[in-house]
């Protein structure tokens, strides 16, 4: 009789422990995301990375029922944002949406950074960003061939604008000048440089397709070429620079990164949602309208791409002695 009562009590106790453990396990394995996700973007509101990050965030929120809060941490060539993301908890609720400067250019331009590539894990490359080589619509230069002839006739006399020393718009232009065998004078800007190109205060610039295409279509600038391997759908009559300079590529990209140590199941959920978003017809159409190329590759492929991208830009930085404090 006594042993039966003990056995029943033990059974009841064990059942209670099992239920508690099961409940705790269910909470620990709650589907991601279970609360709002913060996306750190290293550029001001309204810029290309911000606009596309918000498009992704809206699609992510619709799919998961959890809002995405974009936090703009602009300045210092993406360094401020990268440092903030590197110091965030590795739980998948703070992510970094960034471009090539963070991991492919900054480590070679700056002697010291408050973050390293090892502080992050790549989730996915969302898209590729072609730059468009633009000149004022009032300029007598009407083609890339004209530009090369003019630059060769006046070494260092022509000027090109960029978003700053070591920025993608600077390093990509330096890469092309090296390949073309011509020299121009660099004019770095702290604010948007295209108005000065339009006014012919500076001769030429590379600008991200998102900023350049509206100005091309408005007739304010003339597009001479795009840095992508092929022509882009939004500017079908503008040649790829590689058509005249085989092998040239100067694109940037947007990608999502998480702090190192983020749980594998969270990374897997992030990747799955991102790939669904990027493969969606509506999202792809919007990207292509901005001249952007959807990618959506998994982490392994993204890491291989990052390694190759860093090697290529490191050489350009070294060859041109590009350095910033």
Image: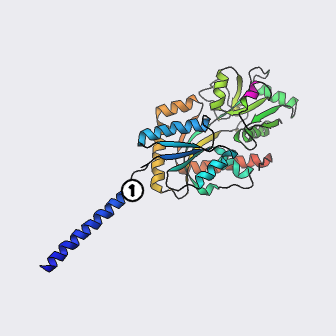
Could you say which is closer to the camera, residue 133 or residue 75?
75
| Element class at badge 1 | loop
- Residue 198 highlighted magenta (yes or no): yes
What's the magenta bit mostly, secondary-structure-wise?
helix
User: Is residue 14 in sight in this rendering?
Assistant: yes
Residue at the spot of label 1 = 29
Q: Which residue: 26% across, 69% down? A: 14
- From this view, report whether residue 75 is shown above or below residue 243: below
In the rendered image, which quarter contains the N terminus? bottom left
**Quarter residue 233 falls in:** top right
Residue 154 picture quarter: top right
Between residue 302 and residue 108, name the one nearer to us. Answer: 108
Which x, y percent locates residue 266?
46, 53
Please name the residue shown 59% across and 30% down the image. 290
- Residue at 60% x, 31% y is 291
168, above or below 117, in the image:
above
Q: Position of residue 262 (x, y in %)?
A: 51, 56
Residue 32 in the image: state x and y as whole percent.
Answer: 43, 50
Residue 217 horizontal side relative to residue 262, left or right: right
Residue that extends furthest to the left in the rendered view of this protein: 1
> Any magenta on residue 78?
no
Label 1 packing within 10 angstroms: few (<14), some (14-19), many (20+): few
| Range drawn in magenta | 195-200
Residue lying at 75% horizontally and 37% vertically, measured from the top left = 189
Question: Which residue occupies the foreground of this view, 153 or 72?
Answer: 72
């Amino acid at each position: 009789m006594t042993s039966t009562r003990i056995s029943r009590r033990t059974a009841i106790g064990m059942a209670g422990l099992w239920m508690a453990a099961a409940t705790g396990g269910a909470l620990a394995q709650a589907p991601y995301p279970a609360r709002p996700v913060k996306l750190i973007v290293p550029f001001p509101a309204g810029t290309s990375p911000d606009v596309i990050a918000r498009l992704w965030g809206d699609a992510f929120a619709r799919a998961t029922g959890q809002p995405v809060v974009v936090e703009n941490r602009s300045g210092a060539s993406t360094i401020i944002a990268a440092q903030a993301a590197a110091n965030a908890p590795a739980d998948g609720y703070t992510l970094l949406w960034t471009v090539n400067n963070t991991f492919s250019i900054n480590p070679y331009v700056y002697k010291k950074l408050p973050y390293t590539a090892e502080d992050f894990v790549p989730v996915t490359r969302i898209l590729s960003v072609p730059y468009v080589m633009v000149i004022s619509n009032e300029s007598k230069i009407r083609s890339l061939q004209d530009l090369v002839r003019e630059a060769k006739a006046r070494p260092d006399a022509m000027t090109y604008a960029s978003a700053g020393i070591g920025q993608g718009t600077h390093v990509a232009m330096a890469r092309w000048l090296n390949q073309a065998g011509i020299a121009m004078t660099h004019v770095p800007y702290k604010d948007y440089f295209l108005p000065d190109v339009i006014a012919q205060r500076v001769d030429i610039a590379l600008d991200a397709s998102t900023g350049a295409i509206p100005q091309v279509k408005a007739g304010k600038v003339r597009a001479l070429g795009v840095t992508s391997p092929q022509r882009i759908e939004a500017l079908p009559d503008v040649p790829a620079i590689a058509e005249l300079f085989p092998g040239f590529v100067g694109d940037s990209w947007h990608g999502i990164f998480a702090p190192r140590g983020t749980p594998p199941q969270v990374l897997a959920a992030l990747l799955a949602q991102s790939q669904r978003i990027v493969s969606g017809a509506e999202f792809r159409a919007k990207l292509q309208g901005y001249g952007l190329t959807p990618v959506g590759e998994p982490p392994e492929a993204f890491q291989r791409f990052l390694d190759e991208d860093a090697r290529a830009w490191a050489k350009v930085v070294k060859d041109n002695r590009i350095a910033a404090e």
